[in-house]
Amino acid sequence: MKSNLRKNLSLDQQTSDGFLSIEYSYDVLRKMNQPAPSVIATDTTSNKLVGYALASLPEIAVELPDIAKLILLINTLDYKGKPLRDNTYYILGQICVADGYRGQMVFDGMLQKHRELYSDRYEMMITCISNKNVRSLRAHARVGFETIYTFNDLPAGGM
């Protein structure tokens, strides 16, 4: 769903529809998916891919430059009086719902599937969302995510 990458969207589209921040290569996706399969949503009538919710274990994430920064940050934070790194967790690498399927509970369904797959092994699912991605922030808050740290995002296109 490269069309949803921040660099491919106008500012109006980013604001109204949200955006993806990271473009993953096939090799990286395969490496992430082997120990922790991602969740994929399809339209059952057309068999079309309509969404995905990536998973990455910390030991894999440290090898991925964009996510390694998040792991370094996690190692400095506390949550409810306990170092965040002392919890068992995995990274929700990115979540995307195709245009035309947004607002139809695809997002909620993929996160519910994540909970079914991983809640017996991990206490937490951690993600990092751009403060400029208002749609994603609202969706995550709606399904129970809590903000534990806020930082200012770089403008579109990075440095």
Image (cartoon, grey):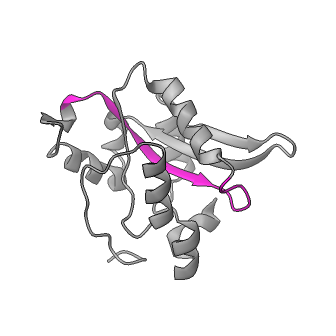
Residue 67 on image: x %, y %: 35, 50
Q: Is residue 98 highlighted in magenta?
A: yes
Decide if residue 140 is in sight here: yes
Residue found 14% across the figure and 46% down from its top: 76
- Left or right, 44 with respect to 134, comes to right
Q: Residue 132, how many percent across, how many down?
A: 40, 70
Q: Quadrant of the N terminus?
A: bottom right
Taking the image as shown, residue 30 lies to the left or right of residue 58, namely right
Residue 83 horizontal/vertical position (percent): 14, 36
Q: Position of residue 19 (x, y in %)?
A: 52, 65
Q: Quadrant of the C terminus?
A: bottom left
**Magenta stretch, residue numbers:** 86-103
- In front here: 23 or 95? 95
Is residue 10 visible to the viewer in this orientation of the structure? no
**Looking at the image, residue 43 lies above or below residue 151:** above
Is residue 73 magenta-colored? no
The residue located at (52%, 32%) in the rendering is 114
Total marks in image: 0
Viewer-nearest residue: 117 or 57: 117
Q: Nearer the viewer, residue 58 or 95?
A: 95
Q: Is residue 127 above or below residue 124?
A: below
Q: Farthest residue in the top direction?
A: 120
> Which quadrant of the structure image shows residue 133?
bottom left
Q: Quadrant of residue 2?
A: bottom right
Q: Quadrant of residue 149?
A: bottom left
* Residue shown at 46% from the left, 25% from the top: 118
Residue at 38 percent of width and 47 percent of height: 127
